[in-house]
């Protein structure tokens, strides 16, 4: 019964969280008025401006990025049979960070679209590199994929440090971006991330049976007729698209892709037919709430990456202790 209710509960929770996030802020709006504005009902002009024009794009961006990171994390944890895997384990995020930093420091920093474009390109190049580095004779061992991702991530992180050292006057801008942010969200950004989310989700949902087979081991999956190498390539491609879209428009937001799938698995079990959609909705709600905290805990706002790290780390430790005792 609990597993059957997990998806309806996750779906029902999301509009409530969206309404709450659109109501709370430095200019508070009654929750009922926020809901009326979201439903297109009659509200005053000021409420419509605050809810629909100022807050809703940011909430929508948080929802799409949270869903993308949670989906990527759930798929990688299933592929590697490791609940500690997360979307940043393959070095794709490090490539995105380096790409954005290069643009911010040396490129067209005054062009609004330049840092996201640099981040997306950097993430895409990193995904291709890790895929090529992990292949041996046309085969991509999962252990080799993981090690190649870690090694590439460390190398790209070192390059990022060198970029920051070479241009200290712009280091503050880069560090602020790296902390994760959702401020100044625009509908064009939401649309771009939504496209990445749709593509990545479609790729993963078409491979749920194969991901379930991977839970039994790569050799067992192959004996069951699963096209092992094609499945690994498809999951890697989907993860790359999801992470690149998220990193390009938010910077580095940790723990969502690690904690949310791990927590959801307690309610859904390991079956990816339930796990993936529930993780997407739960990831969307989680990042919306984290961003709400980021713009509410202090005057002004904190980077949302600080909130997810501060809350996600202890929460994951609690989940880890619980799983070890089970």
Image (spheres, grey):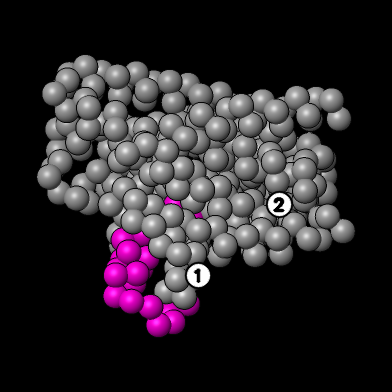
Q: Is residue 273 above or below residue 158?
A: below
Question: In the picture, residue 75 is in which quadrant?
Answer: top right
The answer to whether residue 200 shows anywhere in this view is no
Identify the residue under disc 1.
32
Q: Is residue 75 visible?
A: yes
Residue under the point 47% across and 21% down: 151
Looking at the magenta stretch, what is its main secondary structure? helix
Q: Position of residue 311 (x, y in %)?
A: 55, 32
Mark 2 / mark 1, whichever is N-terminal: 1
The answer to whether 99 appears left or right of 29 in the picture is left
Q: Is residue 242 magenta?
A: no
Dot 1 falls on a residue whose secondary structure is helix
Q: Which residues are magenta?
A: 38-64
Vertical order, 89 against 167 (above or below): below
Q: Is residue 15 above or below residue 269?
A: below
Which of discs 2 and 1 lies nearer the camera? The answer is 1
Q: Residues within 10 Å of mark 1 (few under 14, many from 20)?
A: few
Q: Which residue is mark 2?
A: 275
Going 36% across and 25% down the picture, which residue do you hit?
156
- Residue drawn at x 56%, y 40% as measured from the top left: 257
Find residue 229 and report its horizontal and vertical position in percent. 64, 44
- The numbered dot on residue 131 is none
Q: Quarter holding the C terminus? A: top right
Q: Residue furthest bottom?
A: 42
């Amino acid at each position: 019964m609990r597993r059957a209710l997990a998806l309806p509960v996750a779906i029902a929770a999301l509009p409530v969280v969206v309404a709450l996030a659109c109501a709370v802020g430095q200019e508070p709006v009654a929750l009922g008025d926020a809901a009326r504005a979201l439903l297109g009902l009659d509200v005053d002009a000021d409420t419509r401006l605050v809810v629909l024009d100022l807050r809703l794009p940011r909430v929508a961006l948080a929802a799409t990025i949270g869903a993308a990171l949670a989906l990527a994390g759930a798929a990688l944890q299933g592929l590697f049979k490791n609940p500690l895997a997360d979307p940043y384990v393959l070095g794709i995020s490090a490539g995105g960070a380096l790409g954005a930093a290069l643009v911010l420091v040396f490129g067209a920093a005054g062009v609004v679209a330049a840092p996201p474009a640099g981040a997306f390109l950097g993430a895409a190049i990193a995904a291709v590199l890790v895929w090529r580095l992990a292949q041996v004779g046309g085969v991509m061992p999962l252990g080799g994929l993981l090690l190649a991702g870690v090694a590439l991530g460390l190398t790209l992180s070192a390059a990022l440090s060198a970029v920051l050292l070479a241009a200290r006057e712009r280091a503050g801008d880069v560090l602020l971006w790296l902390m994760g942010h959702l401020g100044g969200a625009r509908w064009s950004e939401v649309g771009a991330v939504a496209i990445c989310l749709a593509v990545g989700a479609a790729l993963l949902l078409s491979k749920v049976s194969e991901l379930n087979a991977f839970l039994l081991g790569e050799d067992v999956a192959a004996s069951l007729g699963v096209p092992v190498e094609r499945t690994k390539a498809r999951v890697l491609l989907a993860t790359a698209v999801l992470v690149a879209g998220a990193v390009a428009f938010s910077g580095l937001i940790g723990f969502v892709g690690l904690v949310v799938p791990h927590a959801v698995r307690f309610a859904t079990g390991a079956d990816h037919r339930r796990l993936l959609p529930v993780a997407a909705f739960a990831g969307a709600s989680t990042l919306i709430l984290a961003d709400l905290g980021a713009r509410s805990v202090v005057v002004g706002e904190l980077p949302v990456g600080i909130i997810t790290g501060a809350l996600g780390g202890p929460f994951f430790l609690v989940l880890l202790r619980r799983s070890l005792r089970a």
